[in-house]
Image (tube, rainbow, N blue to C red):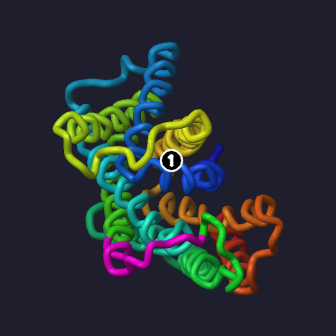
Amino acid sequence: MSYEYLALLAAACWAVGSLMSANASTHLGSFAFTRWRMLSASLMLWILAIIGGGWHSLGADNLWLLALSGVIGIFIGDTSLFAAMNRLGPRRAGVLFASHSLFSLVLAYLFLGETLWGWTLLGSTMLISGVMTAVFFGKRKSEQHAWEADSGKLHTGVALGLLSALCQAVSTLMLKPLMATEIDAIAASAMRMTSAFVPHFLLLLLGVKVARAYRPMTKKVFALVVGNAALSMVLGMTLILLALRHGNAGMVAILSSVSPVLVLPLLWLVYKRSPALGAWLGAILTVCGTMLILKH
């Protein structure tokens, strides 16, 4: 499977997994939710890496880079994203996080020398614009479900959302050279996840207030956490690493940023409400941009 389709499949995993995150993150709080999610994903990934033998590909020369990428992209990035979601609501936070594709393009150009030209550049512009349009103008005034909930903390939420996007872009850029080697993607994901979980757990052991759960864990919330971890972190992030092995970092970031658009039909199925006109227009623009990229 080509890297374009791997990135799109990862976006689909994130879209489905995100439906499980809104209620669970609000119930536990962003720190507790991400800590439980990382623990679940780490256990699943290490089991797969040990069974498949991929852990043998990990060496002292790449462990530090994987660990640093995990701390930046998952510990800081994911926690910031869910903190932004709790303040702005998932839809608005999705607009800000989608900007990681723009950050990735700039960083890939500056540090990896990657450039986009012609039809590919046009398609990328259409895709990014479509994602922003679909999410930003995708709400009906009457919608009050969990995906539209916010606490009114605008400035803090915007800062956290942009921080999460920047961390995602930086961690992706760091992994590109490493994934060109023979390292196993599952083992690499396991190392990144564990490196992100450790500082989260240390904060809890130190009694930091923000690390505590808002409410006790329930069976329903635990099921949502595990399901999200399996789809978004175990499968989704491993697919992204495989995509980085075969494609440039900027293009992988652009294609994986369609996740907020893929959420729209899923919300339609769940809440039985057709997306707003802005969502349709953005989705059409995104699809057209994606088709241009895949064709050229």
Of residues 63 and 161, the one nearer the viewer is 161
Q: Residue visible at 43% across and 58% down? A: 82
- Judged from the image, the secondary structure of the residue bearing numbered disc 1 is helix
Q: Which residue is mark 1?
A: 240
Name the residue type under label 1. Answer: Ile
Q: Is residue 44 above or below residue 144?
A: above
Relative image position of residue 221 (x, y in whole percent): 56, 41
Residue lying furthest front in this view?
215
Does residue 119 appear in this view? no
Q: Is 68 or 79 nearer to us in this picture? A: 79
Badge 1 local density, few (<14 within 10 Å), some, or many (20+)?
Answer: many
Q: Is 155 covered by the magenta stretch?
A: yes
Image point (24%, 44%), residue name: 68
Quadrant (top left/top right/bottom left/bottom right) for the N terminus: top right
Q: Which residues are magenta?
A: 148-159
Residue 214 horizontal/vertical position (percent)? 40, 49
Is residue 269 positioned above or below 94 on the image? above
Q: Quadrant of the C terminus?
A: bottom right
Query: Is 264 left, or right, of 14 in this rendering?
Result: right
Q: Is residue 196 left or right of residue 11?
A: left
Depth check, front residue: 224 or 235: 224
**Residue depicted at x 38% and y 80%:** 154
Q: In the rendering, at what x and y percent does residue 148 appear?
A: 59, 72
Rendered location of residue 260, percent (x, y): 60, 66
Determine if residue 130 is in view.
yes
Q: Is residue 163 above or below residue 34?
A: below
Residue at 48%, 37% in the rendered image: 217
Give the image quarter of residue 100. bottom left
